[in-house]
């Protein structure tokens, strides 16, 4: 209890100046964490909505294949000659032709 009273006594007594650290933390969280995540989600949904026959993709399970059919939120992937599997559109991770950056 004493620690809290010391903390509140050390805070500036001005109206906006007291909230400045909180406003700064919210600003940092938004621009460095929330905004990039929203941008990535929009890019992913745009990619998934533009998948068409013949695209080479990778599922979230790591299965590489070529899109054979897109219908009702499902994709038929051809992963080998005459071997096809049906996966949900949400399970597509990325385009196979996009290279990962070397770290």
Image (cartoon, helix red, strand yellow):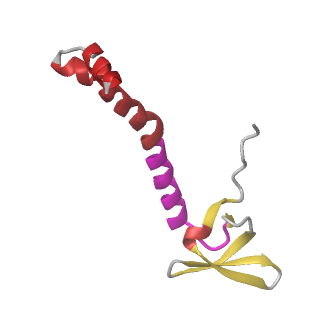
- Examine the rendered structure and indicate whether residue 30 appears above or below residue 2: below
- Examine the rendered structure and indicate whether residue 43 appears above or below residue 88: above
Q: Farthest residue in the front direction?
A: 2
| Relative horizontal placement of residue 53, taking residue 65 as reference (left or right) | left
Among the 4 quarters of the image, the one containing residue 9: top left
Q: Farthest residue in the left direction?
A: 15
Of residues 96 and 17, the one nearer the viewer is 17
The residue located at (48%, 47%) in the rendering is: 37
Of residues 85 and 13, the one nearer the viewer is 13
The residue located at (55%, 69%) in the rendering is: 90
Return the x and y of residue 48 as percentages of the image width and height: 54, 65
| Relative horizontal placement of residue 90, taking residue 33 as reference (left or right) | right
Of residues 62 and 99, the one nearer the viewer is 62
Magenta stretch: helix, strand or loop mostly: helix
Return the x and y of residue 91 as percentages of the image width and height: 60, 69
Q: Which residues are magenta?
A: 36-55
The residue located at (53%, 57%) in the rendering is: 44
Q: Quadrant of the N terminus?
A: top left
- Examine the rendered structure and indicate whether residue 9 appears above or below residue 95: above
The residue located at (32%, 22%) in the rendering is: 2
| Relative horizontal placement of residue 93, taking residue 18 as reference (left or right) | right
Residue 45 is covered by the magenta coloring: yes
Among the 4 quarters of the image, the one containing residue 14: top left
């Amino acid at each position: 209890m004493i620690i809290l009273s010391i903390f509140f006594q050390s805070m500036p007594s001005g109206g906006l100046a007291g909230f400045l650290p909180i406003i700064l933390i919210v600003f940092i969280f938004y621009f460095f964490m929330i905004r990039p995540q929203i941008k990535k989600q929009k890019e992913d949904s745009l990619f998934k909505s533009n998948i068409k026959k013949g695209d080479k993709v990778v599922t979230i399970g790591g299965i590489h294949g070529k899109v054979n059919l897109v219908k009702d939120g499902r994709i038929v992937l051809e992963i080998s000659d005459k071997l096809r599997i049906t996966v949900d559109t949400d399970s597509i991770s990325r385009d196979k032709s996009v290279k990962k950056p070397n770290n």
